């Protein structure tokens, strides 16, 4: 049996808290396909950072360790912890190898995939957006008064790599910065000619995010090795 499997954690970069434990191989830890509604809800709101907890495992060992981590950290739906996992882990999916779907089944699967699933692509009304925004301003914001550690700041920077602000976000940022004195370093940077802006495709953005996650993982791994030495 191949030792190609690993155990990974998805971390909420704003809370610096693990919200999902999984078992996988290859690029599974870095993709957002085939996730639960609860996972999408958290990842869409906060983003996520990947941390490889164990690697070089057989599949059976990976299932065993996945179950161990979920039990130790605790599931949110059971009131035992922050994990959005909705099983205790260690569940081997039924094999679909050589299985052929009937035309009727294929049609049902196609119809079930039509429409708005898991809230993806859902557009909020302007009045609801404004209400949600006001509820998170100032002391109403759960992060009010909190100071991020250097490690958290680095994770936030890496998580936002390749992302673009919408026009409304740019306007809000501009309003917040009005009247704020600039440092000499910032003034000098503004004087320099701007480089040509590159527009990324969705595929390039996904690739950049994947590379950023990988760099973060190897950086943390090297730090752990240096600390152990």
Image (cartoon, rainbow, N blue to C red):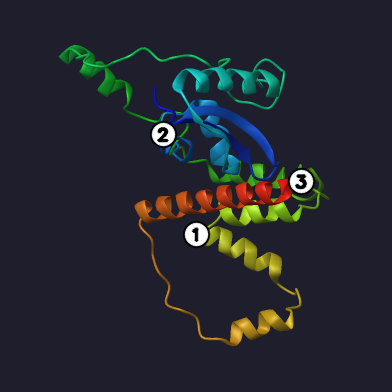
Front of the two marks 3 and 2: 2
Compare marks 1 and 2 and give the one earlier in the sequence: 2
Disc 3 + disc 1, Cβ < 8 Å: no
Residue 91 is tagged as: none
Residue 164 is tagged as: 1
Disc 3 + disc 2, Cβ < 8 Å: no
For residue 168, above or below residue 198: above
For residue 223, above or below residue 22: below
Which image quadrant for residue 85? top right
Q: Classify mark 2: helix, strand or loop.
A: loop
Compare marks 3 and 1 and give the one earlier in the sequence: 3
Residue 33 is tagged as: 2
What residue lies at 74% left-to-right and 56% top-to-bottom? 150
Residue 143 is tagged as: 3
Disc 1 + disc 2, Cβ < 8 Å: no
Disc 1 packing (10 Å; few <14; some 14–19; many ≥20): few
Q: Distance between the residues labelled 3 and 2?
A: 29 Å
Q: Position of residue 4 (x, y in %)?
A: 43, 31
What residue lies at 53% left-to-right and 53% top-to-bottom? 215
């Amino acid at each position: 049996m191949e030792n190609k499997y690993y155990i990974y954690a998805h971390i909420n970069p704003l809370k610096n808290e693990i919200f999902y434990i999984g078992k996988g191989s290859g690029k599974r830890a870095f993709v957002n396909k085939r996730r639960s509604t609860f996972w999408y809800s958290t990842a869409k709101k906060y983003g996520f950072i990947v941390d490889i907890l164990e690697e070089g495992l057989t599949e059976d060992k990976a299932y065993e360790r996945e179950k161990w981590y979920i039990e130790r950290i605790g599931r949110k739906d059971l009131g035992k912890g922050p994990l959005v996992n909705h099983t205790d882990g260690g569940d081997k999916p039924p094999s679909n190898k050589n299985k052929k779907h009937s035309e009727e089944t294929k049609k049902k699967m196609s119809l079930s995939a039509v429409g708005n699933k898991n809230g993806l692509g859902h557009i909020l009304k302007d009045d609801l957006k404004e209400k949600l925004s006001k509820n998170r301003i100032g002391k109403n914001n759960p992060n009010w008064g909190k100071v991020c550690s250097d490690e958290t700041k680095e994770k936030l920077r890496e998580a936002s790599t390749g992302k673009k602000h919408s026009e409304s976000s740019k306007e809000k940022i501009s309003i917040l910065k009005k009247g704020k004195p600039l440092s000499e370093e910032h003034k000098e940077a503004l004087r320099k000619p701007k480089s040509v802006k590159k527009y990324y495709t969705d595929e390039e953005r996904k690739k950049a995010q994947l590379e950023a996650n990988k760099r973060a993982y190897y950086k943390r791994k090297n730090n752990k090795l240096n600390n152990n030495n």
